[in-house]
Image (cartoon, rainbow, N blue to C red):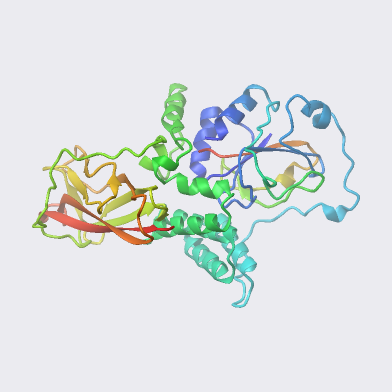
Amino acid sequence: MYLFPAAAAMLAAGVAVMGSGQPAARPPGPFEVGRPFPLFALPDAANGKARSIAEFRGRKIILHVFASW
Amino acid sequence: MVGIVQEQHPDRARLFMQWKQMDWPILVDSLNLLGVSVVPITVAIDEHGVVRAINPRKETIERDFLSKTYEPPASSAAIPVEPRPAVGRPPGRRAPAGAWRKYGEDLLLWGGGTAIDKAVDAFERAARGAADGAIAFRLGVAHRARYDSPRRRPGDFRRAVERWEQALALDPNQYIWRRRIQQYGPRLDKPYPFYDWIPEARAAIVARGASPVTLAVEPGGAEFARPVKTFEARTPTNDEPDPKGRIRRDRGQFIEIEALTVPVGIAPGTATRAHLVMRPNVAKKAHWNNEAEDLVVWVKPPEGWQVDAQYITVARPKEVVSQETRRVEFELRSPADAPAGRVIIPVYALYYVCEDVDGTCVYRRQDVALDVHVRR
């Protein structure tokens, strides 16, 4: 399971722990340094309502992409 | 802190959040719209929405990111507009695959439970128009979502697995897609148990005096199973229960059985996990009769094939009658020299079943043909 070590450590130490991810021969996703993060709406896990990274504009974000398996 | 979780079942993410007492927003990306191929990934995004670091080091994130103030991008056009979730009109008949894919995504995410048939149809139209791994993966997610819903259709689970296999064949380095198959697949392929944290999470939540989030779909045996390094073939201690085939057949009148292996296609010498899902026929008001013996499943592997359980029983509930779904899982391994082609694995189930409460109760056998494709 990928979530536990990274998330547990983050919860213990605020935002200080960054997952290193698996070694990848290509970029891990469709985003790159210096470019806007892609925006699209996704359901909030808490209530299913639509949310987007865009609503956090004006604040810095540490975004953690993980799995619960 | 914001999270995006790659998860087919959003309520499992909710349970995890409840257990870990996460109070930061977490968005569920069941379709992998983000397009990540691995997890975990951490992304530092500045106040203008621009990515400043991917997997930054904890020792330097304060200095290199958090303490900085960033200028907005030179062109305001570089900043995307906030999306508005909505299901639009269906694309035209000749619309490109991408338009149908987007329509399917919107239907699945925002169309509500009744839109799932249209979502499957939209993804199928998209898949017909392009050999695209992302479309195939999302079509698989839609089939599995429908399988888990009251709108389930026969074959949905198998079609989900086949689409995920197709997606992975198009992009074998996509680990999110690979994990979706491994979640239901054999122990030889598993990197870890997928949901063994759930019992621990529930116990911890109850100990805090709270009620755990209810899961719409409980994880099955494959999702708890631990990895193994060698296949554990077992010889049954029981004799075959109906070697001459004398027990009268149920051809689905009483019990409907959905059978598949995950993966559907395997290489010689590798394993696959069989799933038998048995549901009493609602139209007949059929129900299990629990007064006599346990349900039995007998597997007849072809020459050279190994099985980790040939005689399997399903324990009965305490109630005299019941209508629960019963699941049996076991694993098969093909011979190292298996020729390419389709192989049918004969399996049968024996059970006591009644047509209606206080109706006729009978003992029946149902034969199942597990369809495995050996690919060289």
**Residue at image point 45% right, 44% down:** B183
| B318 horizontally vs B177: left or right | left
**Residue at image point 86% right, 32% down:** B68
| B274 horizontally vs B359: left or right | right
The image position of residue B23, as x and y in percent, is 61, 31
The image position of residue B247, as x and y in percent, is 10, 56
B374 above or below B70?
A: below
Q: Could you tell me if residue B281 is visible in this image?
A: no
Q: Could you tell me if residue B266 is visible in this image?
A: yes
Residue B314, by quadrant, is top left
Residue B260, by quadrant, is bottom left
In front of the other: B210 or B184: B184
- Give the quadrant of the C terminus of chain B: bottom left
Q: How many numbered circles are shown? A: 0
The image position of residue A30, as x and y in percent, is 70, 50
- Give the quadrant of the N terminus of chain B: top right
Residue B291, by quadrant, is top left
